Amino acid sequence: MNKTNIVLFGPPGAGKGTQSKFLMDRYGLQHLSTGDLLRAEIQAETPLGKQAQELMSAGELVPDEVVVGMIRNRVVEEPRAKGFIFDGFPRTRAQAEALDTMLEKLGSGITVMLSLEVEQEELVKRLLGRGATSGRPDDRNEEVVRKRIGEYEAKTAPLKDYYKAQGKLRRIDGMGSIDHITDRLVAAIEG
């Protein structure tokens, strides 16, 4: 059975959370957020979770091989899944290569990388609006919001090139209504 594995990309405020819920329902996919995985592994006190907790407690970043190991565990735990949406991972070329290698060993791979493209001023407006209603402090300060968007753009450009070279990058216009954006995502997946 061929799995549909999607890397969902987009800057903060692009609508990844909203769109991933729709894609999960439409295609029967599992959502893999590295933040959620880390918390679950730590709470379950798995060997990888314990290793991650020690590193985080020492103020260090969790290395790629630990994160990829957690993703592998989750993929293996869900053999009947029709596929996965990777959210927040990969963030670097090394992570993308490790993810490809891991999926290959499991007889699978990335189907498509969907990159939600939204104009910067619209992102700022969306995030400040979200900050006013959600209470998230990182969405309330315009300077912080602009810095987060800039960081995203600087760090993810190489990943877009990586997936473009594989013929898997699909740039999606993330402007307009939620339904129109959803229609564009479906067209990219099914087209």
Image: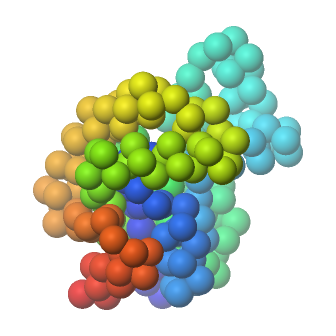
The residue most toward the right is: 44
Q: Position of residue 157 (x, y in %)?
A: 23, 42
- Residue 168 at least partly seen: no
Q: Nearer the viewer, residue 75 or 34?
A: 34
Query: At x 67% / y 20%, what residue is drawn?
Result: 55
Residue 154 appears left or right of 35: left
Identify whether 116 is placed above or below 151: below
Q: How is the image coloured?
A: rainbow
Report the side of 19 relative to 37 (left or right).
Answer: left
Residue 55 seen in the current view: yes
Instruction: Say how many tags the image has.
Output: 0
Q: Residue at x 65, y 39 (%)?
A: 136
Residue 73 in percent (x, y) is at 65, 55
Above or below, comparing residue 96 to residue 3 in the picture: above
Which quarter of the rendered picture does the C terminus lie within?
Answer: bottom left
Q: Nearer the viewer, residue 190 or 172?
A: 172
- Look at the picture and state if 23 lies above or below 146: below
Q: Position of residue 44 (x, y in %)?
A: 85, 45
Q: Residue at x 16, y 66 (%)?
A: 167
Which corner quadrant of the image does residue 107 belong to? bottom left
Image coordinates of residue 92 in percent, x first then y, are: 35, 38
Q: Residue at x 59, y 59 (%)?
A: 32
